[in-house]
Image: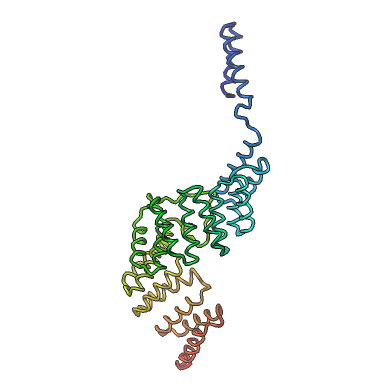
């Protein structure tokens, strides 16, 4: 508008200089029109709009992972407009990621005062109560989120996870099957349905779900970045589709081990590591499979990778010690048993193996 007003002002002087009074009148009207339009509050930019601007800026910082700046902007937004929707919701999201669960809960409850039908607030509270072990509240809140928004895939997941924690596998299965009927390409739903079948001992059904997930292409994945939504630490979807696939391949490997199909188990575990290279547990179990086949060198390599990813796990050090002892690397085996005992002094098996290795070392001729 300022550009057009400036043009009209220039034309005013030009027509006045030439003495073109008819055109001068038209230019003056144009100038007046644009001048008034430029200086009016046509969009009603009051405090509510400033609050929205702070809120939008907070969203940008939150997307970039700058939680401190995002918090500052949301607080400014609420100072301008205490009833601004979703500001408390996103503040709660920030406090959740900072592990201040009490403050997160407070903000989600404040959001519900502002907007009693905010399904994300109910869903996020469901996550919080599940983390605290209050599974009844968690299921109630997830169901409330679904009452408001029946096509809410994350609420179905929270509901299923709450049922899983109480070993209510039939209810978990029912909720996930219903959700997959609505969202057939939502990978997280399929992963948890496979897990529910696995927990029930329905290995073939579990493998079917895992295989379908592993064949899923990225473009069919429904998961999206959602500012107001929180995920708990037991949710592999934080790592994206590849993370879900890594866990699906890992769980498939465990099923194949139970079935004594070692070749397929090994293939699945290798696949899980390709999808998630720092998957300590997959490295450890793959190492144990190589150990069963007396392939001690690759077995040791896998256990070393597991320790690199999870150095404080005494069992990994113990298992590596066993493999090194079988390879007659008694000195290195001793170091691993000692490392296991340093992490877990009451580890009796490690103590026994350490004594055995010490006795074997004492029989070796000194150099």
Percent across and percent down for residue 98 are: 60, 57
Q: Position of residue 145 (x, y in %)?
A: 52, 51
Image quadrant of residue 180? bottom left
Say which residue appears at 50% left-offset and 84% top-offset.
350
Task: Say above or below: 36 vs 356.
Answer: above
- Counting from the top left corner in percent of width and height, residue 249 is at 38, 64
Which one is in front, 284 or 163? 163
Note whether 345 is above or below 280 in the view shown: below
Q: Is residue 230 visible?
A: yes
Would you identify the image quadrant in which residue 326 lies? bottom left
The quadrant of the image that shows the N terminus is top right
Q: Nearer the viewer, residue 302 or 210?
A: 210
**Residue located 44% across and 82% down the image:** 322
- Decide: is 279 above or below 86: below
Which residue shows up at 59% across the image and 20% down it? Answer: 34
Q: Nearer the viewer, residue 122 or 265?
A: 122
Is residue 63 visible to us here?
Answer: no
Residue 232, given in percent of the width and then of the height, sits at: 53, 59
Judge by depth and name the residue closer to the eye, 73 or 8.
73
């Amino acid at each position: 508008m300022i550009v057009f007003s400036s043009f009209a002002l220039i034309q005013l002087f030009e027509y006045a200089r030439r003495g073109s009074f008819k055109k001068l009148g038209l230019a003056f009207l144009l100038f007046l029109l644009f001048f008034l339009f430029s200086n009016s509050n046509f969009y009603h930019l009051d405090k509510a709009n400033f609050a929205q601007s702070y809120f939008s800026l907070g969203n940008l910082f939150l997307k970039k992972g700058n939680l401190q700046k995002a918090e500052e902007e949301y607080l400014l937004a609420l100072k301008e407009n205490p009833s601004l929707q979703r500001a408390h919701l996103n503040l709660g999201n920030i406090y959740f990621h900072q592990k201040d669960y009490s403050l997160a809960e407070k903000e989600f409850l404040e959001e519900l005062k502002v907007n009693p039908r905010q399904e994300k607030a109910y869903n996020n509270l469901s996550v919080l109560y599940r983390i605290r072990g209050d599974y009844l509240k968690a299921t109630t809140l997830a169901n409330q989120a679904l009452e408001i928004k029946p096509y809410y895939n994350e609420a179905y997941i929270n509901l299923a996870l709450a049922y899983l924690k109480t070993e209510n596998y039939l209810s978990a299965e029912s909720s996930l099957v219903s959700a997959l009927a609505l969202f057939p390409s939502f990978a997280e739903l399929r992963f948890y349905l496979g897990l529910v079948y696995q927990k029930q001992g329905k290995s073939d059904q579990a493998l079917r779900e895992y295989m379908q997930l592993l064949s899923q292409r990225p473009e069919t994945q429904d998961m999206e970045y959602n500012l107001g939504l929180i995920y708990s630490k037991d949710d592999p979807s934080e790592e994206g589709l590849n993370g879900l696939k890594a866990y699906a391949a890992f769980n498939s490997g465990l099923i194949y081990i139970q079935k004594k199909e070692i070749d397929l188990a090994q293939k699945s575990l290798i696949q899980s590591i390709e999808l998630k290279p720092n998957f300590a547990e997959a490295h450890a179990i793959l190492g144990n499979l190589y150990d069963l086949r007396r392939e001690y060198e690759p077995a040791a390599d896998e256990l070393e990778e597991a320790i690199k990813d999870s150095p404080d796990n005494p069992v990994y050090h113990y298992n590596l010690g066993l493999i090194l002892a079988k390879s007659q690397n008694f000195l290195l085996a001793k170091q691993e048993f000692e490392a296991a005992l340093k992490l877990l002094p009451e580890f009796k098996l490690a103590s026994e193996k350490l004594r055995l290795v010490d006795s074997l070392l004492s029989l070796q001729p000194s150099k």
